[in-house]
Amino acid sequence: MNITNQHFLKDSELETKQITADALGEGKLIEGNTLNVLAKIDDDAVNVGVTSPPYNKQEKQKGWLVKNVVYDTYKDAVPEPEYQQNQVNVLNEMYRITAPGGSFFYNHKTRWHRGNMFHPMDWLRKTEWTVKQEIIWDRVLAANIRGWRFWQVEERIYWLYKPIGNALIGKELRSCDAKLTSIWRGAPEDGRKNPHPAPFPLWLPARVIISILETETPGVVIDPYIGSGTTAVAAKLLGHKYIGIDRSETYLKMTSDRLENAPSEMPKIQAELALHKVEITAQERRSKGMNMGKYRPTDNERQETLFENSG
Ligand SMILES: C[S@@+](CC[C@H](N)C(=O)[O-])C[C@H]1O[C@@H](n2cnc3c(N)ncnc32)[C@H](O)[C@@H]1O
């Protein structure tokens, strides 16, 4: 089947490694199990991935404050070893399809089973990726609250890197991106605006894409668990191609509707872009006799610009 002009595909219609960067058009939405669909994508075909997989939370009715996440097509509950092995397989497939020098931002969290913590590093270390950074996402108000431990309002985002040859570190971020710090503060998407049970806020994939991809050259962005399409919308509005995968036809329909109306979400992208600016360079700061320290806490830390810039 010629897929170039098709926006919506099913796993069963595709051949192994059939999806290439050249055949993407504006982008592709693919229905199927993530691991099976990834096998249909060519080696080195994408530049950056952003995702939040299902967490295998095995929740019944644990919390007092926030409703449990309930997906439409499946229960988020398999034996933990099976879950972790599946994630290792997905992560290694993501590594194969990512071009050298590319990155994957993998959102997860610490979880507990019978009092014991599962940490995402338990399985990330078993994959081929170089773990470049652990970012804390401070969701401000999030997750269920019980008194077993302090209220967990944070999640983690792992910046995973595919080296070019032996160059394990890769290139530096621009100073206007690096100043944003490794703590990302922002509430999850408002459930009244997005009916998906666990959507990203748009600024999150936008921050990744702005920081990692060059604006002048269209890149390929993938979210292997696309849900309501937030990553694809960010990619489209920032001028890149996208691949979105989900097992739910309903969620893929949400994604395609959002993509059609993407311009209405541009103000949120512009708000994120506005944070990627250096207001004052180190040289200017020095010449004005201003503070040269790297960090000073303020009430509005996320937008703070008191960071040293080499420019
Ligand atoms: C945490 S949600 C992602 C939400 C997304 N970031 C957004 O902004 O809407 C995880 C998604 O993975 C999908 N999913 C779960 N297991 C899957 C699998 N094995 N294959 C494909 N999709 C899966 C679910 O249907 C759900 O939409």
Image (cartoon, grey):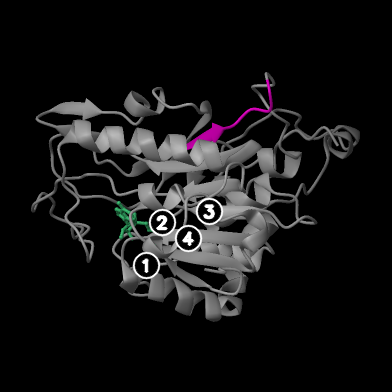
**Picture disc at residue 190:** 1
**Picture disc at residue 244:** 4
Residue for badge 3: 222
The CA span between labels 4 and 2 is 23 Å
The answer to whether the residue labelled 1 contacts the one labelled 2, judged by CB atoms less than 8 Å apart, is yes
The part of the image, by quadrant, that contains residue 240 is bottom right
* Residue 23 image offset from top left, x and y in percent: 63, 62
The CA span between labels 2 and 3 is 23 Å
Q: Secondary structure at mark 3?
A: strand
Q: Nearer the viewer, residue 124 or 136?
A: 124
For badge 2, the amino acid type reads Ala
Q: Which residues are magenta?
A: 156-165
Main SS of the magenta part reads strand
Q: Quick check: is 158 in the magenta stretch?
A: yes
Q: Secondary structure at mark 1?
A: loop
| Residue for point 47% across, 50% down | 16
